[in-house]
Image (cartoon, rainbow, N blue to C red):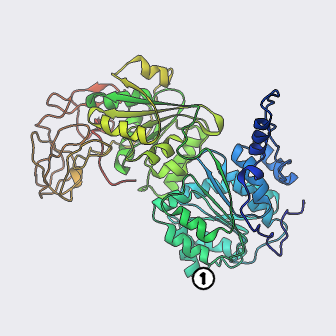
């Protein structure tokens, strides 16, 4: 086995001053050399190999077996410094190859020795369970090539397998902050032997409010250990984290989060609310792998079931699912058994699936960073991709502001059902399928609007058929679920329609007596063939009220 670049007993000496990114980056050095002699013919920059960058032969072979033969820019830029044991601050957008960039120096530094029980030597902190699983999937084969063991540590599942693995001794843990802190308090893990700490997606952890717990965990690690922090941006307290815990870090930036991907085409479909559902169905009905985003957990589940009832097998991913269900649905999407995944923003940072050709924002996100991270699921690793935002008329102004803040200049189209632009993006329609034991579509919730736009404000505790209350306005709509009495105020208008709930006693079903936008007095429903129909039983197993913008708790 190749000797690790860093001695086991001591940390490589820290530089007295931060290294220049240009000096430490082979790519930047090559660019500087070319700019110094403009009169000479400009040769293509030489891309270093992993071996040229100092990666051990065992790891080069492991990467090659996984189809990775040449380093991405962020890997070529950071590996010389990280393999030398320096602290590092890496900034790059999602899909830039950051996981391999920190996995290689992590495994190299720990190779040749085994860790004691409950005292791992490598720590990778990530914000979500999905990201922990996928980061471990990248690290574990590299670790195995060097005789090391890894383990994921996250909540939502029983802790006993994690406790057992720690007791036997693991070298690298990939953990979410909350569960790791719980295991430390119970005495199942210690961080005093940590030699290398990686903080991945630091800005997302800041958005989720995890930085206080991250700081407490870092305080438990030795101060002279190597620390690698990777983040798309340096706002939300990430810069404070870097200044406090990184010592003379080398900074490398390759395509910041605000940089649009050159190979990504952005479109905004301005649609009539009454046609929104069928347009989305046609858009995701091609042969490619599609990731669609909804604003809430309820709408993610609802859209997945609507698409499945229409003959497009889809699964959902959101915070209300058990961990086993989340892993099962993500695996079905990753393996190609299902072509469409409908997710909340929980998936924007946690999904690393190759060959996603289309991202659809069914509900536009609330702010531009979420848009960039959602969209970053496609056009990864140099591949091309298409992003479509579906916007109703009352969302136009907000979507325009969103694109301006994201520095995106999309192609705007006013789209009707069956327009050629849908076929141009979706490609030929895939055959519709009948899914055995498909779940019924949940009733529409109309208490709160989701997505952008000037939706009605509800002051009550209710949300759709399960909420408490009634709202004032024109028209009444019973959602078919158990309704409780109470009161709410406001227009009661969601982004997709103008229907309002009325106070009613507990009932198992209801009838629509008012008007909804585009429905001419009756709720439009979809049959199992995906075609709109003007009337159908409200609780049929393969029928659904057209989504009107969504409601429910955020995912």
Q: Position of residue 139 (x, y in %)?
A: 71, 56
Q: Is residue 546 left or right of residue 471?
A: right
Q: Is residue 296 above or below residue 4?
A: above
Q: Is residue 143 visible?
A: no
Q: Nearer the viewer, residue 51 or 326?
A: 51
Q: Is residue 290 visible?
A: yes
The residue located at (78%, 36%) in the rendering is 34
Which residue in the protein does label 1 denote?
187
Q: Is residue 189 left or right of residue 291?
A: right
The image quadrant that residue 14 belongs to is: bottom right
The residue located at (35%, 45%) in the rendering is 299
Q: Is residue 528 left or right of residue 477?
A: right
Q: Position of residue 311 (x, y in %)?
A: 42, 30
Q: Is residue 442 above or below residue 313?
A: below
Q: Nearer the viewer, residue 17 or 133?
A: 17
Q: Position of residue 160 (x, y in %)?
A: 59, 72
Q: Nearer the viewer, residue 482 or 84?
A: 84
């Amino acid at each position: 086995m190749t000797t690790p670049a860093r001695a086991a007993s001591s940390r490589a000496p820290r530089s007295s001053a931060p290294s220049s990114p240009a000096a430490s980056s082979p790519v930047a050095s090559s660019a500087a050399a070319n700019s110094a002699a403009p009169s000479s013919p400009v040769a293509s920059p030489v891309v270093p190999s992993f071996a040229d960058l100092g990666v051990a032969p065992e790891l080069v072979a492991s990467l090659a077996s996984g189809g990775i033969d040449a380093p991405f820019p962020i890997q070529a830029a950071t590996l010389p410094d990280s393999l030398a044991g320096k602290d590092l601050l890496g900034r790059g957008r999602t899909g830039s190859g950051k996981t391999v960039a920190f996995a290689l120096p992590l495994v190299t530094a720990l190779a040749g020795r085994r860790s004691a029980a409950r005292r791992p030597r490598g720590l990778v902190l990530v914000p979500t369970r999905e990201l922990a699983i996928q980061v471990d999937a990248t690290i574990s084969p590299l670790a195995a090539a060097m005789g090391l063991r890894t383990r994921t540590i996250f909540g939502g599942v029983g802790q006993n397998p994690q406790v057992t693995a720690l007791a036997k001794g693991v070298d690298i843990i990939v953990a979410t902050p909350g569960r790791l802190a719980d295991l430390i308090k119970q005495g199942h893990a210690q961080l005093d032997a940590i030699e290398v700490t990686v903080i991945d997606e630091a800005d997302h952890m800041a958005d989720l409010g995890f930085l206080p717990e991250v700081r407490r965990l870092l305080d438990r690690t030795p101060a002279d250990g190597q620390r690698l922090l990777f983040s798309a941006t340096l706002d939300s307290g990430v810069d404070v984290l870097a200044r406090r815990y990184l010592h003379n870090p080398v900074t490398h930036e390759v395509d910041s989060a605000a940089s649009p991907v050159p190979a990504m085409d952005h479109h905004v479909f301005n649609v009539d609310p009454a046609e929104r559902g069928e347009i989305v169905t046609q858009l995701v009905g091609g042969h490619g792998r599609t990731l669609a985003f909804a604003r809430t957990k309820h709408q993610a589940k609802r859209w997945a079931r609507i698409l499945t009832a229409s003959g497009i097998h889809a699964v959902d991913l959101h915070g209300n699912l058990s961990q086993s269900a989340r892993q099962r649905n993500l695996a079905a999407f990753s393996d190609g058994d299902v072509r469409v995944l409908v997710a909340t923003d929980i998936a924007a940072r946690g999904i690393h699936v190759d060959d996603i050709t289309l991202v659809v924002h069914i509900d536009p996100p609330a702010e531009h960073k979420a848009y960039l991270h959602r969209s970053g699921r496609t056009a990864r690793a140099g591949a091309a991709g298409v992003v479509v935002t579906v916007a109703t008329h009352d969302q136009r102004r907000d979507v325009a502001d969103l694109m301006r803040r994201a520095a995106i200049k999309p192609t705007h189209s006013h789209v009707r059902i069956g327009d050629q632009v849908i076929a141009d993006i979706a490609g030929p329609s895939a055959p519709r399928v009948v899914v055995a034991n498909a779940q019924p579509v949940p009733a529409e919730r109309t208490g709160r609007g989701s997505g952008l736009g000037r939706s009605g404000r509800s002051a009550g505790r209710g949300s759709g058929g399960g909420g408490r209350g009634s709202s004032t306005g024109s028209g009444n709509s019973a959602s078919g679920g158990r309704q409780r009495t109470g009161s709410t105020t406001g227009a009661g208008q969601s982004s997709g329609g103008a229907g309002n709930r009325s106070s009613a006693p507990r009932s198992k079903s209801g009838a629509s007596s008012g008007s909804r936008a585009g429905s001419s007095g009756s709720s439009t429903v979809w049959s199992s063939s995906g075609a709109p129909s003007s009337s159908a039983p409200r609780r049929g197993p393969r029928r659904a009220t057209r989504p009107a913008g969504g409601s429910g708790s955020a995912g």
